[in-house]
Amino acid sequence: MPALVEQPGYAHERLCALTERVPCRETQASTLLALLGEPGHYSYPSIFIYGHRASGKSHVTESILQELELPHAIVSCVECVSAGLLFEQTLVAFFGPEAPSLLPRSSSLSDFVRIYKQLCAQTPACQTRYIVLDRAERLRDMEANLLPGLLRLQELVDDNVTVILLTEIVWDKFRPNTGCLEPLLLHFPDYSKAELQEILVRDYHPAYSPDLYGSFVSILLGVFYSVCRDLRELKHLAALNFSKFCEPLEREEVKESETHKLWRNIEPHLKKAMQTVYLREVSSVQWEQQQQQMEDREAGTLKGLSAYAHVELPYYSKFLLIAAYLASFNPARTDRRFFLKHHGKIKKTNFLKKHEKTSNHLLGPKPFPLDRLLAIFYSVVDSRVAPTASIFSQISSLVTLQLLTQVGHDDQLDAPKYKCAVALDFIQAVSRTVSFDIVKYLYDFL
Amino acid sequence: MSKRKSKESHMTVGECVSQAQKCLRQRFCRQELSTRPMGLESQHKHLLELLRRTAVHGESNSVLIVGPRGSGKTMLLSYVLKELLQEKDVKSNIMLVHLNGLLQTDDRIALKEITRQLNLENVVGDKVFGSFAENLAFLLEALKKGDRHSSRPVIFVLDEFDLFAHHKNQTLLYNLLDVSQSAQAPIAVVGLTCRLDVLELLEKRVKSRFSHRQIHLLSSMGFSQYLETVLSQLSLPADFPDTKFSDEWNANVKKLCEDKSVEDVLRKHFNSSKDFRSLHLLLLLVLGRVTVSNPVIKPADLLEVGRLSSVDSKANILHGVSVLELCLIIAMKHLNDIYEGEPFNFQMVHNEFKKFISRKSHSIHNFEKPVVIKAFEHLQQLELIRPVEACSVKIQRDYQLMKLMLDHTQVMEAIQRYPQCPTDVRQWAFSAFG
Amino acid sequence: MATSSVSKGCFVFKPSSKKRKKNSDVVDYFIEGSDDGEMARIRVNICQRLWDMTKSETEMLQDELNKKILDSLLEFIKKCASSFQSQMNDWASLMRASEIPTAALVLGVNVPDHDMTFQSLSVLLQQSVTPFVVSVQAKECTALKHLMQKVLERLIGVDVAVDDDDEDGGQRSAPVHQKRVHCSLSSLCDWYSSVTKKYETSPGKKRTSMAKDMISKPPIVIIFKDLEAFNPRVLQDFIVICSRYIQKLPLMFIFGIATSPSTIQHMLPHSVSSLLCIELFQSLSCTQHLATVVDKLVLNTEFPFKLSGKVLQVLVSIFLYHDFSVRNFIKGLQLALVEHFHSQPLSVLCCPKKEALDHAQKLSHQEVERIRQLPSFMRYVENQEPQKQVELLTNDGCVKEVCKILMKALRKYHKNYYPILRCLHTLTSSLPKYPLGKQIREIHISCLEKNVWETEEYDSAMQLLKLMAKDELVALLQKCVVILSSSKSKKMKAALGQLQNYLAKFDQLDTLSAEEVMQEAVSPEKDLQKKTDLFQLQKTLLERKETRRTKKMTPFEVLRNQILEFVDSLVRAHLVPPESQPLNEVCYYGSSGVLRRHLNATPRTSIQTALSHPYYYLQHEGLKTDSGTFSNAAPDICIVHKLHLECGRLINLFDWLEAYSTVVSAAEGKDPDSSDYGKVDELKHARFIQAVSELEFLGFVKSTKMKTDHVARLTWGGC
């Protein structure tokens, strides 16, 4: 594999600058560049680049195209609510801001190709034109002919143009059932530990020496690498914890050299951070505040968003929710046993023999009709409640709060069906506030 | 002679390489043939004959070129047309209309396109036509000059022919084929498709108007032919400016094709797919490795490329997932083993995972449920798992039924290749149940 | 319109009519209710005043309650904006450069109440931070393009063309003359850059129109009012798109969350949430909110209109049991207000002191009569000596005079009532297991109901107080001092004085020596001579006894008992229920039934009564029946309903029809043994079908797929 700098057809200093811009991605960059070939040459109709998030796909591609000043259009497919937008952005990038005015409203692929040809005839390409489509997986949701069409765009517009697709998803998930022109697959592997180290160290804190930051990063990786290889997440974590790491230095207790002491200082905090890796619960600011709080009360675990799980509800809403939970996790046939004061002689044994293999808490909630909900509600709620309008309205507000979900159509006015959409610990917390022992009433825990 | 010398003298290696790149790339990327297509002689002859008849004698006709993707349908056609247009009496006379099922998604657009390509917009102006047939008839009429015989023949090329069959009651196909049947104006309808069952898609009335000529490109070439093709595809043309370089190049290519390891690679590739495009893909990758520093193709390059192109992309993706996600995948695999591939939901997976953690978790941190859910979501985003029915907002995420999109071996291989995978995780993966 | 809390059910949105006009017809309403137009008019005015007063009060309350959270929110946004300004030069923000600053704003489960908050928030933002504030609701953003469109339209203020020729008619394509703005953030970028340039170049009107501290590149704040209701996919895509432009556009989000912040995690996968820099803001719980409202509006001497215990109970229970909506609570209060002034003619006197007095002067004869009929007034009269009684019953002038006095007395009563109530609350609210309740409203209610000191809760509270340690007791008493010192009435001043010198004694305690203690012990004797109150005497005697029995109390204990005695005496003196006060009916509104009917309606029960006892509504003699039996002359639907009650879950239509026709023909008075008795003719059939369809419409039965000729009974109908 030729080194990046010695690609034929490009100015040497440009290539050096490029090499600067893509740390730990030289091989991928050079492969890609080799495939693109010299500006004048023909290039393959479509290239499909896949790899994990934050593995430098779009960065490498963009820096190549920008650094080497190749004519290109970069479009994010998420942004394109309609194919028309995609076409426009492309045309603007290639033929100037006036170009899209030629496109008709709600333009189709054929319009695009037509206009492209027309404009291309006026300003023929001396270099390969590149269309970079980020988040390409979204193309599958658009018109059926779009993806195959773009893949063989070169042939359709009869111009030296290459379409580059960037995505996290493998090509097999893209292929239409009647097949299409197979693009050239290129994989961006995830960064190795060493590479991560190298990249993370690059943005060290100006106030401290790079090697201090380096040692911090190595500690960080030591803790997190096993569970999190996402560069962006690691960066976030680094930003989060570095100030903590530096505290002893601030207090002049240890010198930068004594990394071991520093390690002992930071390690517990990183362990705590493990609890909430991936959930961006706390902004860095609030994190730091909480670190302060933890100084005060040592046993304090950090409170992310998930810590505020409990919800204040009106008294009857709580019972309605409880009733809904029971209705959706208990089989209907068991209601007599649970809620009738003196259910006749139901044999404990044959009642308890479970027909289901797995418990309902694995299979999930079942839908139930309104009648059943209210029946259970009236048997669990202690005081006798008038069936007022506000009781019914509470059910609907529970639905709007997404604590209940309505099954089937909304227009179904008579006998609607619902499902309970809350977790066990949530409902337990709720029932504790009204001193109702829900576990006693759950079939799974009998 | 002296001229040649001087010409060579100012042709440095770099220029040579880039020249070579240029012409080979043209070949691989644009599917342009310098020589007659290998292994398709009969088809080529047939098609050429057919079209010439239309072009020269004004006989209407219709033909389907059927063959799998990348088997060189377009290549063949373009080559034939190139040949045809070289004959001068044809060139002045014939007219071409290229339609593509991907572009002309309905007949209205198609008709516009036809009008444009026959450049008759000004003639049509803003006339309004009752029916499609009338419109087409008018267009063809407009091509006639004077008597019936001298009307200019038109060749309609319908790429992705099968897509046209999905248009509303196949009006376009009906009319074109109808014209090609009745001797109104001399047209040839050439359809290209990769669907062997394409005739089944046609309505009866359309089918009956089709001449039922089909040219199949099921290339029957053996490996020896394949090797020849590779050779011819790689070797530089005679008109290459620098003969010295080209001779060396071609000699090297010859040597390359005789190399044993190279042959193995090619055979492997041949067995997987013998079509041109994939071959071109391979060769292009090889070509990418040719630079000033190594101006020739080494067997090593080919081997490397062969290895790269043969890896499973899912394995690539799996290589990058976190240990936690890997654990989830293992849990799913176990579930699949236990319940014979019944769909599962997050709760079950989490259950398995917790069981594993409780049994032996010194290397794997015991994560909160939200964290695990995030990992699960990531797997779904990578489409390594996919919901059974369309993902609706209503249903809770952790009870949504999922299927694992990986098979047993893929998972195992991934675990083998996984960098610094904790031993107990590996053991868990290989343990028989849960 | 804020109906998202009751999503199904029908709502009437009245057009906002002119104030003047509304006022007038209110007057008519009052007048027709009463017989004296003049007084009615006065009452309307008072009512109007009080109404406005409550309104302004609550608004002020709202603001100061939201103030804290809104301020912190503003702080946050300003900070972010400035970091946008200073091109992220410090390391921390550099690391966070790609994240969109986001505020997760948690405000209770009652969604309709949120609107006010968001209103004030956006106003505040527009005044102090940025002119570019957009708020979007879930139901107007079903798809990404709609969300985009809304945001762009509200920012730029022109129609935005979403190029699609499919379903949604809501889209107006842009007018031809103005250039078509595309529904993408890039066009927003262009717009933003142009606008900001304008600001920088021309510091003319635009600049001045905005606040001084407005920065040159104001952020764009997007408020998602109800996060839960949003479609997650739409939200995710939108965030992803925004994050691509964060370098060019200083974007900022505010999530309005009803349930709990963890919904963010439920909605957004990590790939999206990692684009946000979320900060959490929790609004204070609605129960605290209610407490303040009660404190300001109910426990307020300046506010002449009072609620009786029952009514308050109703309002509070609606709040606690059904909707945590403070707004509804206030509405209920206002309803009670109107009801009171409408139903109670004597409410003319329910107004600030001075007016009350001259209104009392202007009382007409009828009203004087009304006063005489007031039970509380009668009780008062009975306690007077005979000739006074006669005079009161005959002489209007005298009544008016007395009335004035009594009104003053009532005012005094209130003046003393509330401070003492607060004191009692401060003393008892910190006791274990809250014998008298945690919230002041609970004590208030129990005081309104009965003599609080006769309840055992009160006794237990007192016992607990008797066990209290010195320092806490002192602390509580200090609080009481503060409360009392705020009130101006003489009695309270006196009480304050006593309390203070008790506290002084506490300070001396440690210096006190034994014989002083003895002196302390007898000290009650002195004031025993002073006070000739029998009650007091007994008490002190009792106390003496027990002091003897419990030999050797520490001086502190003695002092503590004395103080508690004192407090107790205050309670007994001032916390008597208002029923005991003459003329309390003037100010107190007591008919809780009416209120409950209005605020917490039970439509289904009323329908059932209508169907089962048509007489109750129709008042037709023919329908009058003794309980249990059922007149067969009742309307068809009633009969059908009655019959359907006797059936099981599935009802066979034919049997039903048979039964129906029998009943009806009985009503027609056919003789039972005639041939066509109970025979079904077209007319009966038609009537039956109509009745059944009406029942179905009312949601009592519904057709079922299980059996074609059957209908299913619905217990609860739909909701």
Image: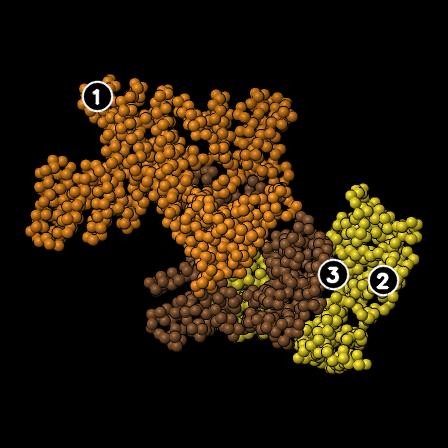
Chain colours: A brown, B yellow, C orange
Q: In the image, is C149 to the left or to the right of C308?
A: right
| Secondary element at image label 2 | helix
Q: Is label 3 on the same chain as label 1?
A: no
Residue C389 is tagged as 1
Q: Is residue A346 visible?
A: no
Assign a secondary structure to mark 3. helix
Mark 3 residue crowding within 10 angstroms, few (<14) / some (14–19) / many (20+): some
Q: Quadrant of residue C454?
A: top left
Q: Nearer the viewer, residue C83 or C301?
A: C83
Quarter of the rendering occupied by the N terminus of chain B: bottom right
Look at label 2 and name its amino acid.
Leu
C-alpha separation, residue under disc 1 versus residue under disc 2? 130 Å
Where does the C terminus of chain B fall, quadrant-wise?
Answer: bottom right
| Residue B196, horizontal then vertical, whole percent | 79, 61
Identified at 27% across, 49% down, the residue is C431
Q: Residue at x 64, y 62 (%)?
A: A72
Q: CA distance from mark 2 to mark 3?
A: 18 Å
Q: In the rendered structure, find residue C43 and report the number of the disc placed on it.
A: none
The answer for which chain carries disc 2 is B
| Image coords of residue C707 (percent x, y) | 63, 40
Q: Nearer the viewer, mark 1 or mark 2?
A: 2
Residue indicated by mark 3: A158
In which quadrant of the rendered view does residue B385 lie? bottom right
Q: Quadrant of the rendered structure where residue B95 is? A: bottom right
Cα–Cα span, label 3 and label 1: 114 Å
| Residue ID at (22%, 42%) | C484
Tag 3: amino acid: Asp
As drawn, which residue projects farthest toward the left? C515
Chain under numbered label 1:
C
Residue named by callout 2: B85
Of B90 and B218, nearer the camera is B90
Disc 1 marks which amino acid? Answer: Gln
